[in-house]
Image (tube, grey):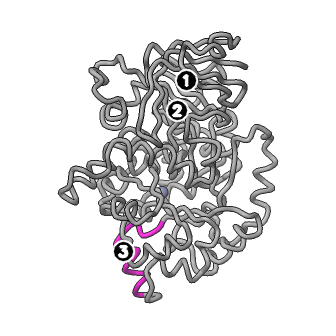
Amino acid sequence: MKIKIINATIIDAENATFTPNMTVCIEEDTISYIADDNNLFCLSFVADRIVDFDGDILCAGFINAHAHNAMTLFRGLKDDVPLQEWLYDNMFIIEKHLQPQDIYYGTQLGLLESIKSGITTNLDAYFEPTKIVEANLDMHTRLVCALGAGDYKNRYEGLIEECNKVPHNNGLISYFAYAHSIYTVDTKGLEDTVYFAKDYNLPMHIHLSETLTEVGECVQKYNRTPVQYLEDIGFFEHNCLVAHGVHIDKDDYDIMLQHNVSVAHCPASNMKLGSGIAPIFSMSNAGINVCLGTDGVASNNSIDMFREMYLGSLLQKVNLYQTDIMSADTMLRMATINGANALKLGDKIGRIKVGYKADLVRISIHDINMQPVNNFISNLAYSAKPENVKMTMVDGVILYENGKFADFIDVDKIIFEANNSLKRLKTVSKR
Ligand SMILES: [Zn+2]
């Protein structure tokens, strides 16, 4: 299909610029031409569909670099407790009873919310990766599937083969090797994850240095910080993306820089679980690639990249008593380009560029909370909300437009099945 977007204000996060009155030509899954509305090629480009943006913002789709979308089932199930209590006494109890179909519909419920907030790619780390892959393929969303979740018995063999049984030839799916954390996976399990990554040539993902408890236990047990401990195991030799990195000190930065380790900052989750404030200003200054994640809805309790950009910025300013840091354009880069780089997809998503995948979002500039426009990027990072998203496109396919999902997405069924799953889970986990 050929789509022509006209009269758009293109946001270039890389250079922190915006350009109004632009046309973007899309052929199948790829951006094929970008020029101003009066360009002769653009004017003569014959499209199956022309979308007039009426001056609205055209932004690269947001990249959620740390998600557990099926945990949307547990929204509000246990609030207002610290991470260890939340995880061990609540989440792990109910998660023991999860069935494949719960993961499928829970993931899709999370994807509905993602799409509405302009997220086009998720790194999703959870149980039943085959179901996560299926759920994403059926919604036509881009997925980096973290393999190994919940698998603490070193049964990695065949995981990729299992996922590959799900038919996909559209390039929407890629994989990371994953271990949940250093406190739920023992040294042998972490070493096996490294072997797995090496065998299949995969980047790696893990929750790291999320709480002081985790760091304190690691130092006591191994006389190493979590970063040093993982380096010893070889975990950083395969392009690692760590989630959180709340309690990382400057001595660890050298190790992370040496191994090109990226950090997925999850400000809402860190604040809600009382985990602390990740030093992302200092990490970014040191040259570490920092991107954004929502974490699971069970600890957030939303999937809203606008909120993560806003909180991520304000949290650093208030913590360091400094206003000229983590600007709107920095936050936008974190939500797009830095996320793409962290997921090893920087050569095909995260930017609006000819040859890049058409993962695009339209954000209204006409809504009340987006008026007036003194600065497009400021409005985007500090004022916008999911309800301002007017269109979300992944791989050249419009998934959401003017409040409606595409015909192949059955919203009512997803909500109905997700509620059925939750009902059953709550009953069996109380037995
Ligand atoms: Zn997480």
Above or below residue 226? Residue 64 is above
Residue 10 image position (x, y, % from top left)? 48, 27
Disc on res. 333:
none
Left or right of residue 155, residue 398 in this image: left
Name which residue type carries label 2: Ile
Labelled pair 1, 3 in contact (Cβ < 8 Å): no
The stretch of residues the image draws in magenta is 208-220
Between residue 215 and residue 153, name the one nearer to us.
Answer: 215
Q: Which residue in the structure is indicated by mark 3?
A: 249
**Where does label 2 land, which residue?**
115
| Position in image of residue 92 (x %, y %) | 50, 61
Q: Quadrant of the N terminus?
A: top right
* Nearest the eye: 276 or 109: 276
Q: Element at badge 2?
A: helix
Please say whether residue 358 is one of the residues in the magenta stretch: no
Looking at marks 2 and 3 on the same chain, the residue that comes earlier in the sequence is marked by: 2
- Whole-angstrom CA distance, mark 1 to mark 2, is 7 Å
Asked if disc 1 and disc 2 are in contact, CB closer than 8 Å, the reply is yes
Q: Is residue 212 found inside the magenta-colored segment of the image?
A: yes
Disc 3 secondary structure class: loop
Point out the tag, 1 or 2, that comes first from the N-terminus: 2
Q: Which mark is residue 400?
A: 1
Examine the residues drawn in magenta and state their main secondary structure.
helix
Pick the residue in front: 278 or 68.
Answer: 278
Residue at the (51%, 74%) spot, across then down: 182
Kind of residue sitting beneath label 1: Tyr
Q: If you read the primary sequence from the N terminus, does the residue marked by circle 1 or circle 3 appear first?
A: 3
